[in-house]
Each structure stands twice: as structure tokens, then as C-alpha cells.
Image: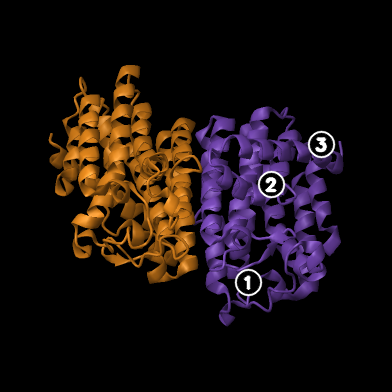
Chain colours: A purple, B orange
Amino acid sequence: MTFNEFRAKWTPVVDDYLAAHLASEIDEVKLSKIMTYSVMAGGKRLRPLLFLATLDAINHHITAQDIQIAGGIELIHTYSLIHDDLPAMDNDDYRRGKLTSHKKWGEAEAILAGDALLPLGLQWIAEGSESADLVKIMTRAIGANGMVGGQYLDIAATNNATVATDANLINRMEWLKTGCLIVASVEMAAVAGCASAANKAKLLAFGRSFGRSYQIYDDLVDIVETSTAAGKATHKDQENGKHNTLTMLGAERSRAELRTLIKAAQTSLTGLDSGILAGFLDLYQKVL
Amino acid sequence: MTFNEFRAKWTPVVDDYLAAHLASEIDEVKLSKIMTYSVMAGGKRLRPLLFLATLDAINHHITAQDIQIAGGIELIHTYSLIHDDLPAMDNDDYRRGKLTSHKKWGEAEAILAGDALLPLGLQWIAEGSESADLVKIMTRAIGANGMVGGQYLDIAATNNATVATDANLINRMEWLKTGCLIVASVEMAAVAGCASAANKAKLLAFGRSFGRSYQIYDDLVDIVETSTAAGKATHKDQENGKHNTLTMLGAERSRAELRTLIKAAQTSLTGLDSGILAGFLDLYQKVL
């Protein structure tokens, strides 16, 4: 199966799970609607697909429980987007071509929708895996030493000129902000699918290269795409005093860095039956 | 051992765990400081103590792992206070006699401190218990059908006059907002300590009565105490268009309701060696 076939097969399964369970599992209808609005706003389901593709790469048959875990990963990703968009954070009005949660529903509602998606995501991971191990991987990836720590560094670095050329800080910030959740999606699959130690090491190496590269890709989208194509405001990082690999290295050196990481990710997969995982790297073609 | 002796023994153990591990486990020093500021602001550690006292009531020897779980519960409670105080929510300037997180550190910092405390609390619960079961109990208690759902109803009901006499809605809102996390603390101990089915039923009945009564008590504190004694603004619920049991029933009928719940909680404990758990109800004397 190719990456595109895999994506075409599993994206609607994940989407259907998300829509059905956000409707059936939440008592308060309006709150369910607010949460659903952001979850069903047209995300690519990159992280759930990465979890499922990693399972596939180690010949683990994908079950209903795995779909629940995949859905949990997407809820957590969505919570992070809702909070990142808040006025006190990146203050974004549009996301995926639609009004952001706080613009659509109000600020308290957006904070609470995020605060409800996060534990529901972890609940689905605990229920789907029946394992404390997956919960530990995810909670470590999204907390102060992971995703939230990266967002904190981003906020602290904004409009701070001394950060502009601090490669260590920028690498660390982008790794935490974006890489940690991506590599956790791979690691959870390696653990859930009982990968051998050798395969797990390869998968984690792939996850780290892909996780690091994804933020560089996302930054490049900011300058390559029009805001219509991206579904959100573009060309705004530099204007807003944001620091990232792109503002530090410029477009050409960022592309070179991205190519290096793609090569490393491909090399990591040597010996694994992983054409589908390698296919995730094709997403980057549009910015190269 | 009396309730006061139990509290005097275990409160410093929980406090020391929290202070030591928030300092050692978080890489980013400033973010650790922001999280620690709210966690170590002088809370009573009611929920961790309730978890530990429930273990004690079923003759479970309290271990280092149980302290980690207890600490995790307190992190989650603290996250909820930080987010409840935000300008878009209850907009409080003081909590426990100190500036609230967003007044002290900034709004983005407060949102992120909460967003970091929540997964760290669940991480500690997963690490301490090595069980998906405790994670499931906690995540269900604090999400859309629990604590966050209650806060959502509270926000939606504020300044909505039709809510003022809606006993069902007010009961449900206060139960979700405050009761769910309290009963989860009891249930997690019943599961971690392998309580018999009969004892678990008694403990949960106690937890439900105590959990429901605690918000009524907290509302009464709002009118009984001066703001200096309470460490936060008091006499503000009615002014701010808030609806709760107190604004619905008035002080005397709220006290009667509280006495009824205390009686029910005491009756639930019949047959358990639970003088310490019963002692939690003595906290209410100051508003009766």
C-alpha cells in the first residue's frame, strides 16, 4: 500500500471516530459543539496517521482500540492549537480557513474547550491501550519538558532580539513545540505494537528527524503559501517578532536543513517495511 | 490517629514532594518557578489528603508511589484554579492571599503554567500507579463531563437570570465543578488500595456527599469570612452575577443542606475504620 492509499483509507476512519465520539461522549451539547468545531475543522490528521502507519510498519494489525488512541492524539493536538491561537498567545483569528475557537465562541469557551480536549485525549489513550506506558509517553511529550515548554519558550522569545541568532534556543524551542508530540505518536505505536528493540530504535530515529523537520516545513509554508491556501494568516512570523529556523537561516538554508533531515529520516528506516512512513516526507515537496 | 494528627503528618510530606519535584523535573527554570508559585501558594492539600486518608481507611500502607499520586492530584487542582482565575473566566486578582498567576506572571504564562501542570499531574498518577485505571478515573473526572464541564456551565450561567432558581442546573454545575475531582480522589484510592466492593461502595457514597457539600461550604466561606481570612475577594458572587446554592437558597437553607450532606457522609462510613475521613467534615464547622 502506498502512503496516499494508506492516508485515503484511514483518514475517514479517524474522522468518523472523532465526530461520532465527540457527539456521543459529551453530555453538554453546546460544549460538545465547541470542541467539535475545532477538531473537525479540516486537519490533516498527521499525528494519528503517523501512529497508525508506525503500527503498520511493524506489522501490527490496526484495531478499534488503535483508532481510539489515534483519535486521542488528535484531540490533544487540537487542544494545543486552540490555546496557541488565544489572544494572550499568538492572537490568531483564522486557522484552517475558519475563525479560531475564541473568535467563534468566546475566549472562556476556547480555554475550556482546550481544557476539555486534553484530558479526553488522554482518557482515550488510557482506554484504548489499557496501559500506563502510553499515558506516560504522551504526558511527558506535551508538558513543561515538551510541547508546552516549547510554546513557553516561543512566547518568551517573541520580540526578544537576542534570540534571533541563538541557534541552540531556536532548535530547542521548535523541537519541544512540535517535535515532541510527533515523536511521541511514533513511540506510542512502537510500544503498543511491541516493536523489537532494534525496530523501536529505528522508528524513534525516524520520528526525531521527522518531528524536527516538521516545524521547519511549517515555517516555510508561512512564506510559500498564500493565506487562502494555508487557511490562516501567512507572512506574519517576521512581522510579529517571532523567531524560528526560517527567520534565523532564511529560506534557502532552511530548505537545505529540511533536505538534510529528510535524508536522515529515510536512512533511519533502512531495513523496515516502511514505504508508508517514508511517504510522510513527500508532504514537504511543496516547500522544497 | 485523629484527622488533625493525620493532616499534620502527611501535609508536609505532600508539600515537600511537590516543591522538590517541581524543582527537579522541569528543565526550564522560569516555567518551573511560575508553576511552583501557584502550587506552593498555601493550599490545604485537601484532595491529596483525602486520597491518602481513603487509603488509610482501607488499611493500605501509604508508599512513596502514593505520595506521587497525591501530588499529581494537587497539580491538577492547581491547574484548575489558575485557569478559573483568568481574565476571560472569573477574573480574580488574588488567590490564597497572593496575586493570581496571570497578575503575577502574565496571561500567556498563566495559561501555559496550567497547561503544563495538568499533564504533569496525570504523568505522576500514571507513574505512581503504573495503571491505566487511575488515569481513566481522573481524566473522566476533570473533562467535559466533570470539572471543566462544571466551569463551562458556571460561565454560561453567569448573569443569566433564568438560572437563579434552577436547582437542577445549579446542583449539576456545582457537582461537576467541585464534586467530581473530590470523588475521583476517593475512588482512585479505593482502586489503588484494592478496597472490597462493599467498602468501595461506602467510600464512593462518602465521596459523593463530601464532594457535593464542599462547594456549598466554599460558597458560605464567601460570605462568612473577610477577604483577609479567605485570602481572596469575598462577598463577590452575588455582585458578579454568579449563581450557586447560596444565592439560590440563602445562607440558612444552605447551612441546612450542608448539615444534611454531613449526616449522609457520616452514615456512609458506617462499618469502616474511618475516623480520619469523618474528620474532613469538621472543616465545615466554621461556616455552620
Q: Which residue is mark 3?
A: A9
Is any part of residue B44 visible from this angle? no
Give the camera-side residue of A136 and A120. A120
Disc assigned to residue B275: none
Q: Which residue is mark 1?
A: A167
Three-letter amino acid code at the position of disc 3: Lys
Please provide percent x and percent y for residue B133.
46, 30
Q: Are marks 3 and 1 in contact (CB under 8 Å)?
A: no
Please provide percent x and percent y for residue B118.
46, 50
Q: Which residue lies at the image location 83% right of the left edge and 64% below the top edge?
A: A287
Disc assigned to residue A47: 2
Mark closest to the chain's N terminus, 1 or 2: 2
Three-letter amino acid code at the position of disc 1: Ala
Please provide percent x and percent y for residue A79.
59, 52
Q: CA distance from mark 2 to mark 3?
A: 15 Å
Q: How many marks?
A: 3
Give the camera-side residue of A256 and B265. B265
Q: Quadrant of residue A176?
A: bottom right
